[in-house]
Amino acid sequence: MTNNIVVLGAGVSGLTTAYLLSQDPSNKITVLAKHMPGDYDIEYASPWAGANYMPVGKEGSAHHKWELDTWPALKEITEKYPEAGIHFRATLIYNRKKDQETDTGKWFSELTQPNPWYKDVVPDFKSVPSDRLAPGVDNGQEFTSVCINTAVYLPWLVGQCIKNGAVFERAVFKHIADAANAHHTGQKADVVINCTGLSSKTLGGVTDDKMYPARGQIVVVRNDPGPMMSTSGTDDGEDEALYIMTRAAGGGTILGGSYQKHNWNGIPDMNLANRIMKRCIDICPSLVKEGQGIEGLDIIRHGVGLRPLREGGTRIEKDKVDGVAIVHNYGHGGFGYQASFGCAYSAVSLVKEILQNKSRAKL
Ligand code: FAD
């Protein structure tokens, strides 16, 4: 028996879900999306991400499990498929207790605490000795993580899906149920997987009011400082952030950032860009030559992406809209890559439940 499946959305959530489902030859998959890898658009979060693995899920939560389950998959891809554009990178995290109550501090609270759950997941975890901490930093840790070149990794996922028989088509839907009628076979889809990110706020049949953006501004530069680093906050504003990560395969270094909730502005703010560059050099002088300031940065581009946050957390659940079976997988905030496989495993197991019920109904 074959299963006709539509995946709506070609960001990291849709592509990872399609990649897993495409490994079963009985699944005939159509990936439909307004934006595809190669596009840069404010409605498409995935290309803008750094992206790295810096876990933020609270211990014991579903989010914790999704991140836990994602590390082995990212590690395996990094080791086995260099063409996927992911590399291992030394990582430094600095925590200042004074950031605890800020938006950025809360976002990073699990990441920056001295004894986090992920210490047993990522390799080489150790605390930074206090005599190596800058003034004002209360604790720090180092470990090995990954940095994903999204401009290489997203097309790699597309390639894996196509190799397994999936079909990709551009399409824009006003209502989720309409996607069931757009399967490439011409038959109605048995299930539609909703991976539309922030657009789930307005997509007919979903219209999820709990969705809102956390605006992230970045500067991409050619300079390469070595390790990745991040802090719990900055002195420039409660919704500003500080992180540095060099992407694999010549992808440049991402300097971040911001975490501006409910801000939809897609245009880079040059004052914020200056603050981002300045504080990155302050914490990591090796970004530029000795004695240089931001004039020593070789800028590739400025960028803004909207993290698809959801009050109450990511939505991975079954639904039925106008008679169409749906599995939702959206609302991944600032952790869509580092939770991608865990979330996709959960979505795939819901798809299997729907398909099993379909087979039983046909007997
Ligand atoms: P999206 O990438 O937004 O994809 C949505 C898809 O749905 C698109 O293909 C779109 O065209 C399609 N779509 C939407 N509506 C419709 C419609 N009506 N009809 C047809 N198609 C539709 N995460 C990490 O894990 N690590 C990081 O280091 C990291 N850094 C980040 C830095 C920044 C600056 C930003 C902005 C985000 C970062 N993230 C990071 C978060 C991560 O990028 C997101 O969580 C993730 O990209 C969300 O992916 P998605 O597939 O759910 O949504």
Image (cartoon, rainbow, N blue to C red):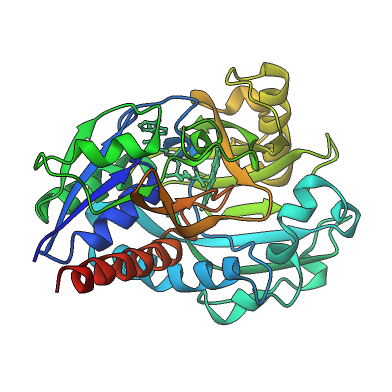
Give the residue drawn at x 36%, y 70%. Answer: 349
Can residue 265 be seen here? Answer: yes
Q: Residue at x 25, y 57 (%)?
A: 19
> From what the image shows, is residue 113 above or below residue 222?
below
Location of residue 126 (image quadrant) = bottom right
Residue, far bottom: 120
Residue 262's spot in the image, x, y percent? 71, 32
Looking at the image, residue 173 lies above or below residue 225: above
Q: Is residue 145 left or right of residue 261?
A: left
Specify whether 90 is left or right of 215: left
Q: How many marks?
A: 0
User: Which quarter shows the C terminus?
Assistant: bottom left
Q: Position of residue 183 (x, y in %)?
A: 18, 41
Q: Which of the 4 image quadrants contains residue 31?
A: top left
Percent coordinates x, y for residue 350 in the rendering = 38, 66
Residue 116, position in %: x, y? 69, 75
Q: Is residue 352 above or below residue 54?
A: below
Which one is nearer the viewer's eye here, 65 or 206? 206
**Measuring 52% from the left and 67% from the top, which residue is drawn there?**
67
Identified at 86% across, 40% down, the residue is 235
Q: Nearer the viewer, residue 314 or 227?
A: 314
Q: Could one spot residue 248 in this view of the protein?
A: no
Image quarter (top left, top right, bottom left or bottom right) of the N terminus: bottom left
